[in-house]
Image (cartoon, rainbow, N blue to C red):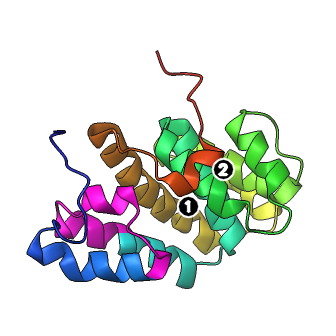
Amino acid sequence: MAIFPVHTLETVPDDSREQAEKTAERFGFLPNLVAVMAESAGVMEGYETLHKLLMTKTGFTPAEVQLLALTISRRNGCTYCIAAHSWRAAQSKGMVPTIESIRTDQPIADPKMAALADFANLMLDKQGRLDEEDIKPFLAAGFERRQVMEVVLAIAWKTLSNYVNHMADTPLDDMFQETKWENPDAS
């Protein structure tokens, strides 16, 4: 047994049960990531809250949130999140070429999506220590000042899940097998 079990709705700790049940209802199953996070109600709720904020309180479209999820997860080498978000992003019209570009670390054809991915990578490279010249191309691509900070929110959201997946070696759900990703940078 792994140190972090993949819980079921029957085995989740009591303080995680309500959130796990809501997630299972929303997805139609309990994703393994959430099943692992259920070990800590705070971690699971934090992850869900950050995602909800990204989807409802930022200037990003759902496709842009998926691009951020993929870009950050690619940088962090998270095989689970790349597979899950590749599957999810493929449901957004026109995202398949962008998904493949991120998965294979190739240039993104759509200029605005490329600017978003480049900015997220720059934010990660510089650990948030950006100056005005770093931010200008992002704004010139059509993003707003508030979205500079909202990229940090996306980084927090995905870093939380990426690190949990790394520690727990979260198994990929059957539903995401078709978008499985092997990290070319893994040793």
x, y percent for residue 171: 39, 44
Position above or below: 26 against 123: below
Identify which residue, 118 or 72, lies in the foreground.
Answer: 72
Residue occupied by mark 1: 151
Boundaries of the magenta span: 26-47
Q: Residues within 10 Å of mark 1 (few under 14, many from 20)?
A: many
Q: How many marks?
A: 2
Identify which residue, 29 or 70, lies in the foreground.
Answer: 29
Q: Residues within 10 Å of mark 2 (few under 14, many from 20)?
A: many
User: Label 2's element?
Assistant: helix
Which is the main secondary structure of the residues drawn in magenta?
helix
Tell me which amino acid carries mark 2. Answer: Phe
Q: Residue at x 69, y 75 (%)?
A: 61
| Label pair 2/1, CB-CB below 8 angstroms | yes
Q: Which label sits on residue 119?
A: 2
Q: Quadrant of the N terminus?
A: top left
Q: Can residue 60 be seen in the rendering of this structure?
A: yes
Q: Residue at x 47, y 76 (%)?
A: 28
Q: Is residue 45 left or right of residue 128?
A: left
x, y percent for residue 72: 55, 47
Image quadrant assignment for residue 85: bottom right
Dot 2 or dot 1, earlier in sequence: 2
Tell me which amino acid carries mark 1. Answer: Val
User: Label 1's element?
Assistant: helix
